[in-house]
Amino acid sequence: MEEVSAEAAAMASGMAPGAGAGGAEGATMKVVAAVDASEESLHALSWALDNVVRPHPGASVVVVHVQHHADHFAYPVAGHGLQYVPPTAVDSVRKTHEENSRRVVSAALDVCRQKQASATAAVVEGDAKEAICRAVEDMHADLLVLGSRGLGMIKRALLGSVS
């Protein structure tokens, strides 16, 4: 199940970004789509391309993927103080994260190509919630698109959700 804000629905219906709120008419809209390895995030991107970007030919799309930090060198171990991780293990984890990011971004850009929409991509590091918010602010995005896994209240409370 996807979550759509009132602003996204207004934009999808043809209103200019910021219309009715003193925004400049005809301004180029910037859409940031946060994606991960889930089908839901790609579905949300596809929806945004069809319903928001297509009606606004000047809109720009940035696909953002968040990669977790892989620079933890020491972990606490009960009764033993700190356990140090060798740099080779950290490098291996970092390479795996980079490979995963390439696959995720490639899949998202494929969706954009199929919809004949041009897009750029950015991979940012950190906690997903914070990194996405920071990217939206830094890029001065007009709209953020997130997919929802469609979890019920109990599963969402137990598993958590970025959206």
Image (tube, rainbow, N blue to C red):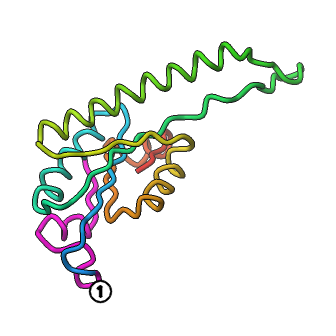
Q: Position of residue 160 (x, y in %)?
A: 48, 43
Q: Residue at x 46, y 54 (%)?
A: 135
Q: Quadrant of residue 156?
A: top left
In front of the other: 52 or 119: 119
Q: Amino acid at mark 1?
A: Gly
Position of residue 138 measured from the top left corner of the image (x, y, whole percent): 47, 59
Report whether 44 appears left or right of 92.
left
Measuring from the top left, give residue 19's x and y in whole percent: 22, 80
Q: In the rendered structure, does residue 9 fall within the stretch colored magenta?
A: yes
Q: Which residues are magenta?
A: 1-23
Q: Is residue 113 above or below residue 130?
A: above
Q: Residue at x 50, y 19 (%)?
A: 96
Q: Image height check: is 120 above or below 99? A: below
Question: Circle 1: is it few (<14), some (14-19), or many (20+) Cα within 10 Å?
Answer: few
Q: Main secondary structure of the magenta part?
A: loop
Q: Nearer the viewer, residue 133 or 80?
A: 133
Residue 77 is one of the magenta-drawn residues: no
At 42% from the left and 58% from the top, the residue drawn is 139
Q: Residue at x 28, y 55 (%)?
A: 3
Q: Is residue 116 left or right of residue 78?
A: left
Q: For mark 1, give the secondary structure.
A: loop
Give the percent coordinates (x, y) of residue 6: 25, 69
Q: Report the label total.
A: 1
Q: Which residue is mark 1?
A: 22
